[in-house]
Amino acid sequence: MTKGGKPMKSNTMQTEELVKKFKELFGGEGKILCYFSPGRVNLIGEHTDYNGGHVFPCALTLGTYGIVRKRQDNKIRFYSHNFSGLGVIDTSLDDIVYSQAAGWTNYPKGIIWAFAEKGHPIDSGFDLLIYGNIPNGSGLSSSASLEVLMGTILNDMFQCGFSMIDLACIGQYSENNFNGMNCGIMDQFAVAMGKKDCAIFLDTSDLSYDYASVKLEDAKIVITNSKVKHNLVDSAYNQRRNESETALAELQTVVDIKGLGDLTEEEFEAHKDAIKDPVRQKRARHAVYENQRTIKAVEALKSNDVETFGKLMNASHISLRDDYEVSCEEIDVLVDLAWSVPGVIGSRITGGGFGGCTVSIVKNDAVDTFVETVGKGYKEKTEHEAEFYIVDIGDGAGFLKEAN
Ligand code: GLA
């Protein structure tokens, strides 16, 4: 990890240290289990997942660790090592309701709620310590990571028999209906179904998927964190989703489709006048073209044509900036700087938008110049310090080990 071009000390805590902390807080007896759930980065296919289109994310080796032990009563004790100042948060199975005061615990609580909704009420409490090394507010899916972590733990501890895809859907269901964020399925799916060195080509219209190797010989995938997260992210996201849904309903009066992802570019151009509002038309154009770009990008990658993949990433950014309008000044500065560096194959905003991170494909021998040029230029133009992560693609969520 590097920050502003200088190497940064890794803050990853070993599971042993986490187990030690767990025992200090909750006592050492009984069966203590360790789990991990990754974050994700999306390579291309942005704001297509709730439009029935394709996405192409991968799981990171950064993520959330969970150390847990079942209890005999209905108490739940939560502790986040990231928010250690909050101390142990005591609650119980009788208090599974959303509240602002519950802060981060609304995510695990939402999963407990969703398990009950899906026919598996949880019948005893637990002690849970979590620790995450996904940078906060970076748009690398720390919330989906935590949701799928909780799902994986409950599924194992209470033997519910859900598949990893079920757990992804439960995570989304809980985020939509418990936490009020109307997200699509991409993040939870990537976190649950990630595979080392592969990205997931997911068709969100039916959840069919395919893994594609992204082991690049002479290039690296670099995430740049703008360290900026603008307010209203969730409300702007929900608004984009509403605009897309209205545009879809208008198109459905003239063409038989289930989602914007069903249309080719040509079909969209032929029918777009059914969308009455010019802003909504731009939103729909993004969803249709971005889906087609994603399909083409994966084809290009499969035939080792990384250059074409990069060009499609650049086009994706322009569309997210101008048509979907989910970029922001800081992110555009990062992308413009990236595009100016020789050896950068492609660069774009990644995730929900309004801040967060960019993702770039950079030739191996250009990585140092990339970090220096983008880091320096960003600092000059915005006074923020960017952070850079060279991506290691990891596996999806799962059990790590039983603690001694
Ligand atoms: C957020 C959502 C995802 C997806 C992306 C945009 O990360 O959680 O479902 O819509 O934004 O592609």
Image (cartoon, grey):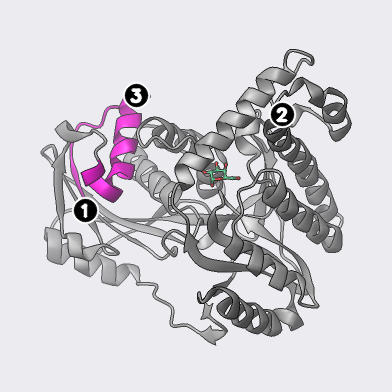
Badge 3 element: helix
The residue carrying mark 1 is 31
Looking at the image, is mark 1 or mark 3 nearer the viewer? 3
Badge 1 element: loop
| Residue 394 in view | no
The residue carrying mark 3 is 117
Q: Which residues are magenta?
A: 100-127
Where, by quadrant of the figure, is residue 152 drawn?
top left
Residue 361 as seen in the image, left or right of residue 334: right
Horizontal and vertical percent position of residue 11: 39, 75
> How busy is the neighbourhood of tag 1: few (under 14 within 10 Å), some, or many (20 plus)?
few
Badge 2 element: helix
**Residue found 47% across the figure and 55% down from its top:** 230
Residue 164 as seen in the image, left or right of residue 129: right
On residue 264, the disc is none
Horizontal and vertical percent position of residue 276: 72, 23
> How busy is the neighbourhood of tag 2: few (under 14 within 10 Å), some, or many (20 plus)?
many
**Residue found 82% across the figure and 62% down from its top:** 306
Looking at the image, is mark 3 or mark 2 nearer the viewer? 2
| Ligand 1 within 8 Å, label 1 CB | no
The answer to which of marks 2 and 1 sits earlier in the sequence is 1
| Residue 82 in view | yes
Taking the image in four quarters, ligand 1 sits in the one at top right
Q: Amino acid at mark 1?
A: Lys
**Residue found 79% across the figure and 14% down from its top:** 254
Q: Amino acid at mark 3?
A: Glu
Horizontal and vertical percent position of residue 109: 28, 39
The residue carrying mark 2 is 260
